[in-house]
Image (cartoon, rainbow, N blue to C red):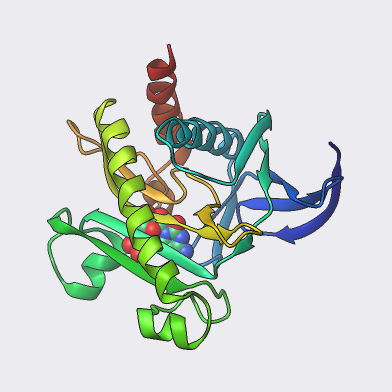
Amino acid sequence: ITRGDLKYQGKAKSVYWTSQADILWLHDTNQATALNGKVHENISDKGRLNSAISYLLFKHLHQHGVATHYLKHISETDELVEKLDIIPVEVVVRNFASGHFVSRFGVASMTELTPIVQEFYYKSDALDDPFINDSQLIALHYATAEEIKSLRLKSAEINDILRRRFAEINIELIDFKLEFGRRADGNMILADELSPDNMRLVDKTSGQSLDKDIFRQHKGDLTVGYREVLQRLEKLEK
Ligand code: C5P
């Protein structure tokens, strides 16, 4: 399989066509962004760390029977994925209050959320990813009622699996963002990536942040936390 033309230049990744129409080539860049791309910086080694973490988490989900677009880790910073018809929705799952949940609802940071909170955002840089609810999704034909039900079930299941995985390495999964897409047969599966760019992770003992919040809050070198997450995940592989 060979890499073709650039299909889409994202913030933290580039998406290419390949010699096979149903397969895409993802390249993880070293770009870190915040505030929907208004702040960005090149951070050496970030692409490799994200690519490696994403690979291990997708592999773990596969071992637990979750269908995803992930096909193959082909280099330190590149992966092959199934081409899907992406649903223009970001699904955010929250186990604890943090980030926008705290600023929006005025609750204390790290308040445990029971049951878990699931939020939908319409994917649009121009509109700053606004909140979108079920009836809006259906009326705008972005997803069917069946698909919305499935988005909730699948994201809750993925949360259970990932939360348990991170607990094994003394990390709390605070919240994260998922994206889904449809296969040609209409079946909806997990897409995008699974990395500390898209999830909040804290060490259960020290409370230290191991994700992109370090960059968002100008608190130093983000790769220290990413490297720590990768090292702990790699230990589980042995
Ligand atoms: O900013 P907020 O608190 O809503 O983010 C919730 C979670 O979703 C965080 O883990 C964040 O990294 C992720 N997220 C994302 N992409 C977005 C918005 C949020 O990965 N566009």
Q: Residue at x 43, y 17 (%)?
A: 237
- The residue shown at (58%, 42%) is 43
Where is residue 3, by image quadrant? Answer: top right
List x then y, in percent, for residue 161. Answer: 32, 39
Q: Quadrant of the N terminus?
A: top right
- Which of 1 and 221 lies nearest the eye of the viewer? 1
In the figure, is residue 94 to the left or right of 91?
Answer: left
What count of labels does the image hold? 0
Q: Position of residue 104 (x, y in %)?
A: 24, 74
**Which residue is farthest front?**
185
Give the residue at the far bottom of this rendering.
Answer: 139
Nearer to us in this view, 99 or 141: 141
Q: Quadrant of residue 55?
A: top right
The residue at the point 87 percent across, 45 percent down is 19
Can residue 133 be seen from the camera position used here? no
Image quarter for ligand 1: bottom left
Looking at the rendered image, the quarter that the C terminus falls into is top left
Q: Quadrant of residue 132?
A: bottom left
Where is residue 105 drawn, in percent x and y? 19, 74
Which is nearer the eye, 209 or 149? 149
Q: Position of residue 156 (x, y in %)?
A: 30, 53
Give 60 or 111, whichever is nearer the viewer.
60
